[in-house]
Image (tube, rainbow, N blue to C red):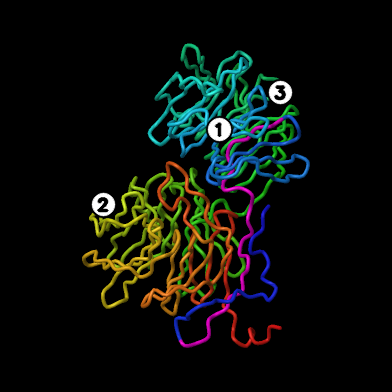
Amino acid sequence: MTRFLSKTLAAGLLLVSGQALSATPPPAYRQEVVVAGSPFQGVHGLALDGKGHLLASNLLGQSVHSIDLSNGAVSTLVGPPLGGADDVTLGPDGSIYWTGFFSGRLMRRTPDGKTRVIAEKLPGLNSLAFRRDGRLYVTQLGRGDDVLSEVDPSGRKPPRRILSGHGFLNGFEFGPDDRLYGPLLMKGQIVRIDVDTGSIETVAQGFAMPVATNFDASRENLYVLDSVLGQLVRVRVATGEKTVVAKLPTGLDNLTVGPDDQVYVSNMVDNDIRVVNPADGSIRPLVEARLSVPSGLAVAPDDPDENLYVADVYAFRRVGGRDGKISQTTRVLSTRMTFPMHVSLGAKHVVLSSAYLGNVQVLDRASGEVLRTIPNTNGVQGALELPDGTLLLAEATTGKLVRVDAAEPAGTTVLTGGLEGPVGLVADTEAKEPGVYVTEVRSGRVTWVRLSDGTRRTVAKGLKAPEGIARHPDGGLIVAEVGRKRLVRIDPATGRSTVIASGLRIGLPESAGMPPGYIPTGVAVGGSGTIYLSSDVESALYRFVPVPQEERRAQP
């Protein structure tokens, strides 16, 4: 696992260069780990290579990994941006194939290490498996599609559609009878499909959300994952009889079964892989993590403990900014919450936005209950609640800031347009003329927008891919300048910027099918002046702690 910012510099400080915001000496910061990182950004499909390694697909991290089964060591076979894999399998010749859910591309890596596109323009491309005769089948689900197709493994022929509208066929496998066995996610069923005729038979039903199936060594039983219930279930194919083999955390995504019947299970919420022994139901970790894909951050300015609210894409978590303890986790799929990528705090509410599923949610800050879900398919990134209860959304795809009514039905009004990839928002509502600061990832600007009429002025320009933004207690703006891998401080009066830290491991490449900013790098500032930063590359959280002048003077 790569480590970044796990140690301070030799002097233990990050010195700020350039013009300070006040007459006091430029501040210095000590860099510290809040939550250590992990190899994945929400692990998904799995496959055994028969050589002592497990292949693992990493959709949001855009990579395909190999895991040594003897010690859990993780290596990268295909890195971003080509490795955006939702599911992965091995072909008859040893080539690795994987599906790009966002990109809509089917990829192949041959044994000599060459990678190329086999098929494209297949939105929602999800699961895949080979038939015994070497024919390859894939599914599309979500993003407007529900399709099973045959694809030429060589990429010479166009895909052939077999079924559509059948109920979201997810992780599947071919059985000894040459039929396809898999879960219909929307129907709670395990089905058997004749891919030559398109006929469908029900094998078992009554699941909450079955997401993947694989045969055991005898080929008489299927192992099934129920993501919502957190169960590994054995289904006897001949009768449909179900037996719960193990209880696991919710958010399960995929599985594969070894020749010894050990079941390898991925969990996208916990970002880990566990091994289940079906003989006794025992569970052991293979790869562990504490966060999945930390992106948007928020901290209440009056919270002395500086608890962080973390939009972790597959979960919404509260993390102690000082001790790194995770005190609360709300998980996707098993709750009404949907894949949060940004978070902001109001007096009574938490606002989450998700470009992943295209919506904004308002939660009760005390209870965590979802109060409103507002669809938005325009690449919504930053979102915040204004003092009058209306919401302000940054539509990265359309370049607009839009206001959403506080009451239902949720009517919208365009505050301003013409922005180039708006991503981060921070309110300036206490000023004489209330406004909002917005980062534009495409133009490299920080722009101030007046809330009364949408009038704009440029605060800073010449930045490279600015994303997360937060207000410092002294009035300065703290911005994640992702394109230069650094954290900067901007004087909102002059636009002058000061580098706080550089060489940061932030900013995964943008993915086809996702809006500008992709997975945003989050920034938050506590009342103490400590700056918090999320790392999408490392799936980690870091803090930059102000160093008192007397401590700086004591440094050798």
Quadrant of res 542: bottom right
Using the image, tell me which numbered label, if any, was put on residue 217.
Answer: 3
For the record, the magenta segment spans: 23-49
Q: Using the image as rendered, state which of residue 517 and residue 340 is in the foreground.
A: 517
Query: In the displayed structure, does residue 206 sit left or right of residue 351?
Result: right
Q: Position of residue 464 (x, y in %)?
A: 45, 60
Mark 2–mark 1 contact, CB under 8 Å? no
| Earlier residue among tags 2 and 1 | 1
Dot 3 amino acid type: Ala
Q: Residue at x 78, y 41 (%)?
A: 70
Q: Position of residue 538 (x, y in %)?
A: 60, 55
Dot 2, crowdedness within 10 Å: few (<14), some or many (≥20)? Answer: some
Quadrant of res 258: top right
Q: Position of residue 466 (x, y in %)?
A: 44, 61
| Earlier residue among tags 3 and 2 | 3
Mark 2 or 1, which is nearer the eye? 1
Dot 1 amino acid type: Arg
* 310, above or below 231, in the image: below
* 145, above or below 387, in the image: above
Dot 2 amino acid type: Ala
| Earlier residue among tags 3 and 1 | 1
Using the image, tell me which numbered label, if any, was put on residue 496.
Answer: none
Instruction: Give the residue pinned by disc 1.
Output: 116
Mark 3 or 1, which is nearer the eye? 1
Whole-number angstrom distance, CA of label 3 to CA of label 1: 33 Å
Q: Residue at x 61, y 30 (%)?
A: 89
Dot 3, crowdedness within 10 Å: few (<14), some or many (≥20)? Answer: some
Q: Using the image as rendered, state which of residue 72 and residue 446 is in the foreground.
A: 446
Magenta stretch: residue 32 in it? yes
